[in-house]
Amino acid sequence: MGRVPFHWSPLAFVQLVGIEPYEVMQVLQGKRPRWPVRKVHPDGLRVLEIWGRTQTGRVLVVITREVRGARFDYQILGAREMTAVEAAQYDEWEASRG
């Protein structure tokens, strides 16, 4: 993934329980590999989850949605820590890139 302009949703900060905004930006703009995972949530919302690591190695999922016709490409909806299963999948994906 190249550099993509991101914009914070006003509600995104409510979704950052135990996660700092700078950690989200480290995942989105850092030099570590990021895994884009497209999903459709049960309510029909199409999102792009970006799986990655912070500078300290914390594994996070940043949830974004594409916004067409705006000054930015993706809106940050929130972030969460990866589950153990997701972290194992990410570790395997990350190792395969080496």
Image: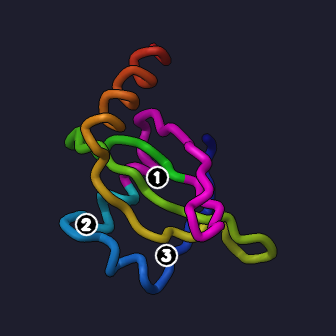
**Amino acid at circle 2:** Glu
The stretch of residues the image draws in magenta is 26-48
Q: Which type of secondary structure does the marked residue at label 3 adopt?
A: strand
The residue depicted at 63 percent of the width and 43 percent of the height is 2
Q: Secondary structure at mark 1?
A: helix
Examine the structure image and report whether residue 34 is included in the region drawn in magenta.
Answer: yes
Q: Secondary structure at mark 2?
A: loop
Residue 65, given in percent of the width and then of the height, sits at 61, 65
**x%, y% of residue 52?**
39, 42
The amino acid type of the residue labelled 1 equals Leu
- Which badge, 3 or 1, is on the more N-terminal residue? 3
Find disc 2 in the rendering and name its residue: 20
The residue shown at (48%, 60%) is 63
| Mark found first going from the N terminus, 2 or 1 | 2
Direction from residue 95 to residue 49 in the image, left or right: right
Using the image, tell me which numbered label, if any, was put on residue 8.
3
Residue under the image location 43 percent in, 56 percent down: 62
Q: Which residue is mark 1?
A: 28
Q: Percent x, y for residue 33?
A: 46, 33
- The answer to the question of whether label 2 and label 3 lie on touching residues, with beta carbons closer than 8 A, is no
Few, some or many residues within 10 Å of mark 2 (<14, 14–19, 20+): few
- In the rendered image, the quadrant that contains the N terminus is top right
- Residue 21 shown left or right of residue 5 in the figure: left
Q: Amino acid at mark 3?
A: Trp
The answer to if 96 sits in the magenta stretch is no
Q: Along the line of sight, which residue is nearer the eye, 98 or 65?
A: 65
Residue 96 shows which numbered tag? none
